[in-house]
Amino acid sequence: MINRFNKAIKYYFEDKDYNKAYNSFYKLAKEGYLDAQEMIADMLLSGTGVEKNIEESGYWYKQAALQGNLNSMHQYAFFCLDYNRKEEADIFFKKMIEQNYLPAIYNIASFYHEGNFGYSVDKKEALLLYKKGCKLKDFKSCIQAYGIIKELNGQKKATKFLSEEVGLWRFFKIFILSRFQKIKNKFS
């Protein structure tokens, strides 16, 4: 199967023969080959070499996501958000969060933090998710958690959170970077 996939990749990227690539990917996708399912979904979504078909693209993204691949789930969840299927996106985001998939944790936290993609602003929910990301050693999540704690509970509690949750060395790096970001924002 991998040889057939590599041929399809060659048709797509080197030969620019999108019709041949699509037909090759499609056969592999029907056989359940995850990477081919994602390629078919991308081609259908963009209309590369085939007529653009959002519904069929969604079908193939979902087939890849149902195989349990976290990256595929993430792609499908965003596809759902882009095409007003928030409830379905939530199902996949929940699965990814349960499996500690950092991109999903950070994205959902930021949706709650900023009120994007139909999510209401909920700083407490955002904080819970950012803290989860921080525990998984995601630097951006730590900075965001620090900012929300500072906003809700003041500088002392935010500093305490960083020093206890993150450790002194990481705390120092985060603190310096947050100061740098403030300075950078003043000049932007």
Image (cartoon, helix red, strand yellow):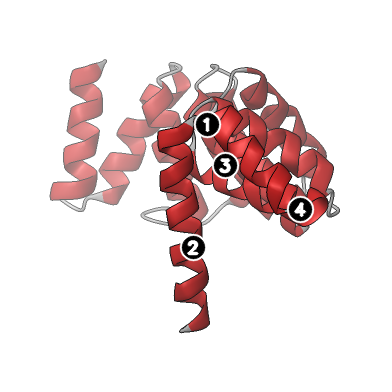
- Marks 1 & 3, CB-CB < 8 Å contact: no
Q: Quadrant of residue 59?
A: top right
Q: Nearer the viewer, residue 5 or 104?
A: 104
Please give left or right for residue 50 compared with residue 154 in the image. Answer: left
| Mark 1–mark 4 distance (CA, rounded to whole Å) | 18 Å
N-term mark: 1 or 3? 3
Q: Residue at x 49, y 63 (%)?
A: 179
Q: Quadrant of residue 169?
A: top left
Which is more foreground, mark 2 or mark 3? 2
Q: Secondary structure at mark 1?
A: helix
Which is more foreground, mark 1 or mark 3? 1
Tell me if mark 2 has few (under 14), some (14-19) or many (20+) residues whose alpha carbon lies within 10 angstroms of its own.
few
Q: Nearer the viewer, residue 36 or 160?
A: 160
Tell me if mark 1 has few (under 14), some (14-19) or many (20+) residues whose alpha carbon lies within 10 angstroms of its own.
some
Q: Quadrant of residue 165?
A: top right
Residue 178 rendering spot, x and y as whole percentages? 50, 58
N-term mark: 2 or 4? 4
Q: Can residue 141 be seen at all in this image of the molecule?
A: yes
Residue 173 rendering spot, x and y as whole percentages? 41, 46
Residue 167 rendering spot, x and y as whole percentages? 49, 29
Q: Looking at the picture, which amino acid does disc 1 mark?
A: Val
Residue underneath mark 4: 154
| Mark 1–mark 2 distance (CA, rounded to whole Å) | 17 Å
Tell me if mark 3 has few (under 14), some (14-19) or many (20+) residues whose alpha carbon lies within 10 angstroms of its own.
many
Residue underneath mark 2: 179
Residue 113 rendering spot, x and y as whole percentages? 74, 52
| Mark 2–mark 4 distance (CA, rounded to whole Å) | 16 Å
Residue underneath mark 3: 141
| Mark 2–mark 3 distance (CA, rounded to whole Å) | 16 Å
| Mark 1–mark 3 distance (CA, rounded to whole Å) | 11 Å
N-term mark: 1 or 4? 4
The disc at residue 166 is: 1
